[in-house]
Amino acid sequence: FEEKNGVRASVSFGSTGLLAKQIENGAPFDVFFAADTTYIDTLERGGYVVPETVFLYAEGAISVALNEDLGLSVSGLEDLLNERVGVVAIANPAHAPYGKAALEALQAKGILEKIKEKLVYGENIRQVLQFIETGNAQGGIIATSLASSHKIISSPVERALHRPIYQAAAAIAASKNIELAEEFLDYVKGPDGRAVLKKYGFLVPE
């Protein structure tokens, strides 16, 4: 988008819930990509986003990840039970949709109670990845879109183990760059934007 339009996009990363709260408090964002459609719905009801720009851009997926220095292989959630995995990181399920999905998957697999003592929460999914990359956590559950890191090994979690992670985007009503915001959203909807989403592990709606 930057190459085609000659503009620079400044990206702020954070958990969906906290970013939504910042938007309600007047944060100067132009577009919002939420990892859970309910947050976009709430913002729309409050008049914080432009209704006609709201669209479903992807369905997220989660993966089990281990620090590569452990020298272990990874094939599923059961690998988090390994005694060499002393700390398991997930995003905080209170405000991070990927953390909520991780918790659901652990519960569905009957693993949650067995690893409860070694579970730690990251503020968002990128912090979880950082925990695992640095070895502060030996394993965890991340967004599949982040699984290309060279410092981890990963394996996808079955989608049936958690509710779908439907992700929506919208332009912010208070944006001072509303036309450019809408252009960016149109780009994401188009073939080039969809190709990027697919490349990074997102399931893209038709």
Image: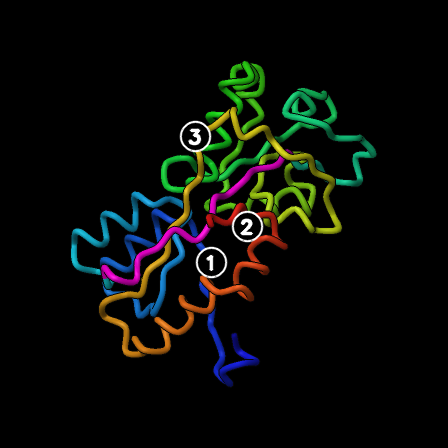
Quarter where residue 75 is shown: top right
Q: Residue at x 17, y 59 (%)?
A: 47
Q: Residue at x 61, y 44 (%)?
A: 131
Give the residues drawn in magenta, as a range. Answer: 51-64
Q: Position of residue 119 (x, y in %)?
A: 54, 28
- From the image, state whether disc 2 or disc 3 is nearer to you: 3
Taking depth in this image into account, of 66 and 201 the one nearest to the observer is 201
* Label pair 2/1, CB-CB below 8 angstroms: yes
| Mark positioned earlier in the residue sequence (2 or 1) | 1
Name the amino acid, label 2: Arg
Q: Residue at x 42, y 40 (%)?
A: 97
Taking depth in this image into account, of 187 and 84 the one nearest to the observer is 187
Quarter where residue 185 is shown: bottom left
Most distant residue in the front direction:
206
- From the image, state whether disc 1 or disc 3 is nearer to you: 3
Would residue 141 appear left or right of 86 to someone viewing this image? left
Would residue 95 appear left or right of 202 to someone viewing this image? left
Q: Which residue is mark 2?
A: 126
Residue at disc 3, secondary structure: loop
Rendered view: 6 above or below 115 = below
Q: Which residue is mark 1?
A: 13
| Mark positioned earlier in the residue sequence (1 or 3) | 1
40 is within the stretch colored magenta: no
Q: Which residue is mark 3?
A: 163
Q: Which mark is residue 124?
A: none
Name the amino acid, label 3: Arg
Rendered view: 86 above or below 149 = above
Rendered view: 190 above or below 133 = below
Q: Residue at x 47, y 74 (%)?
A: 9
54 is within the stretch colored magenta: yes
